[in-house]
Image: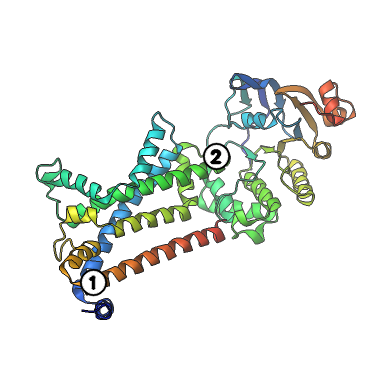
């Protein structure tokens, strides 16, 4: 197969809405979106609390979180694998090689990003707003809703950064999902497998979708900051 | 309209504020009865800003006490503060006012009606839906005052409210403050601008290096202050 034919076949897969192809795309999105949603629900309040709290060892926590933003996905996958494997502490749940296990692994990848970026955003806002919020009686935890709302555009970008990391990674979902056809096969694991098998059109078609997704994320992030500048100043 | 008991007079009893072993505010004592405009006057670093923050409760005195005639605690504390650089939330003009009212525990309908009233009172009605942070400096300070006014304070603190504004905006804010005093709101503001103090003050508290040097009616203060430091300040001589 020459390169032109490969591109043609890949393109046909994408626009032809092949059911097997769509199933892979849809599972990937489901896993990643769920992971980002969970990381957001946990990470936004936690990041805000970390921004306002003062305790011994706070700097250590911040440094560790910043470091975890660069945690290699395969390592996150390995940790979840060890926890969920039959002899592991959570083995009885029987989650290994399921979409749930992939979600858990991706939450671990996304959560440090959400917490660290939220912490930074909220801390900067708090420094700016502190006097006024204290003046109207919003101190400590009572200031958090205001700070999260006013940081909404920067925080949307943080969630999109998390989404970008989770949708692009292959190591974690491959280890804990097992790349089982029709069950835990995502875009990235399929590209890995099909490339080594030689089914280049499928790999390339999924690659195109991933690139389109990355472009879309960046467009939305850019739009969010522009809207933020326009409506929130 | 208001609760029957007033939070005024405010009593400041021997208040000190120490940082790094130095008394930045040193044993200040004075009272603020209802009515009029009191100016905290003094050069930069005299402790004017700290004094306002201590009175408003943003800082705790390291010694002495700030006492109100009746409980000013609770969510609606009936004294409000406007800062040197207006602090605008990243929301619309009307939402900035509604937020402060919500923080004070007011219901939705109450927030809307008081918000509309405040916008009309301060000439900001046509700006209601605009982003607060995109207003000009003068309009932002006007909004900050409108937001404080909506809380219906008996005493309003202002920390150098015009130091970042041009002469036209400064004049506008000064007229506005005179209007608040005429309305019966007690105002206490800091400034290092002698002209402004002359134009606005009913009473002057002169601070120097954290100490309250002179407390006098504005007229007699500007006619001839008793303290040497105050005379030097009025003469424009550097005293810090």
> Gap in Å between the C-alphas at discs 1 and 2?
49 Å
Q: Chain of mark 1?
A: A
Pointer 1: what residue?
A: A22
Using the image, determine if residue A75 lies above or below residue A99.
above
Using the image, determine if residue A215 lies above or below residue A79.
below
Using a 10 Å C-alpha cutoff, classify the residue at mark 1 as few (fewer than 14 neighbours), some (14 to 19) or many (20 or more): some
Q: Point out residue B70 in the picture as x, y percentages from the top left corner.
A: 61, 28
Name the residue: 53% across, 34% down.
B74
User: How many numbered discs?
Assistant: 2
Q: Point out residue B2 in the picture as x, y percentages from the top left corner.
A: 63, 40
Name the residue: 70% across, 21% down.
B29
Q: Kindly give the residue lying farthest to the right in the view shown.
A: B223
Q: Quadrant of the C terminus of chain B?
A: top right
Name the residue: 15% across, 68% down.
A197
Task: Specify whether B167 is left or right of B144.
Answer: right
Q: Chain of mark 2?
A: A
Q: Quadrant of the N terminus of chain B?
A: top right
Pointer 2: what residue?
A: A130
Q: Earlier in the sequence, mark 1 or mark 2?
A: 1
């Amino acid at each position: 197969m020459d390169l032109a034919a490969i591109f043609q076949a890949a393109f046909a897969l994408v626009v032809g809405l092949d059911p097997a192809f769509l199933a892979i795309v849809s599972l990937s999105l489901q896993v990643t979106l769920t992971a980002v949603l969970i990381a957001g629900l946990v990470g936004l309040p936690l990041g805000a609390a970390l921004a306002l709290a003062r305790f011994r060892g706070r700097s250590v926590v911040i440094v560790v979180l910043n470091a975890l933003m660069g945690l290699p996905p395969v390592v996150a996958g390995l940790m979840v694998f060890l926890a969920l494997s039959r002899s592991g502490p959570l083995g009885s749940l029987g989650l290994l090689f399921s979409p749930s296990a992939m979600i858990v692994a991706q939450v671990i990848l996304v959560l440090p990003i959400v917490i660290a970026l939220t912490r930074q955003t909220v801390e900067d806002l708090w420094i700016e707003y502190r006097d006024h919020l204290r003046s109207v009686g919003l101190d400590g935890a009572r200031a958090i809703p205001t700070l999260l709302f006013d940081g909404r555009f920067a925080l949307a970008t943080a969630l999109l950064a998390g989404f970008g990391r989770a949708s692009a990674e292959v190591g974690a979902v491959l280890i804990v999902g097992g790349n089982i056809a029709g069950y835990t096969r995502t875009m990235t694991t399929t590209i890995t497998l099909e490339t080594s098998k030689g089914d280049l059109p499928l790999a390339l078609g999924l690659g195109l979708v991933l690139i389109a997704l990355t472009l879309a994320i960046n467009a939305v992030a850019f739009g969010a900051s522009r809207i933020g500048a326009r409506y929130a100043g | 309209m208001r609760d029957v008991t007033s939070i005024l007079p405010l009593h400041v009893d021997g208040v000190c504020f120490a940082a790094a072993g130095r008394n930045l505010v040193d044993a200040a004592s004075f009272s603020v009865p209802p009515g009029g405009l009191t100016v905290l006057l003094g050069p930069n670093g005299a402790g004017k800003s700290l004094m306002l923050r201590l009175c408003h409760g943003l800082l705790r005195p390291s010694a002495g006490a700030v006492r109100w005639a009746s409980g000013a605690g609770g969510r609606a504390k009936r004294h409000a503060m406007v800062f040197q650089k207006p602090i605008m939330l990243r929301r619309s003009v009307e939402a900035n006012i509604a937020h402060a009212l919500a923080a004070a525990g007011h219901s939705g309908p109450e927030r809307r009606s008081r918000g509309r009233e405040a916008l009309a009172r301060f000439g900001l009605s046509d700006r209601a839906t605009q982003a607060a942070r995109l207003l000009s400096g003068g309009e932002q300070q006007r909004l900050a005052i409108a937001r404080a006014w909506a809380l219906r304070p008996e005493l309003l603190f202002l920390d150098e409210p015009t130091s970042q504004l041009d002469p036209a905006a400064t004049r506008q804010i000064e007229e506005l403050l005179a209007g608040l005093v005429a309305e019966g709101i007690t105002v206490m503001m800091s400034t290092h601008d002698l002209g402004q103090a002359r134009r606005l003050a009913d009473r002057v508290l002169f601070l120097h290096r954290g100490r309250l040097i002179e407390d006098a009616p504005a007229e007699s203060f500007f006619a001839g202050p008793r303290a040497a430091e105050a005379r030097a300040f009025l003469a424009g001589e550097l005293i810090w």
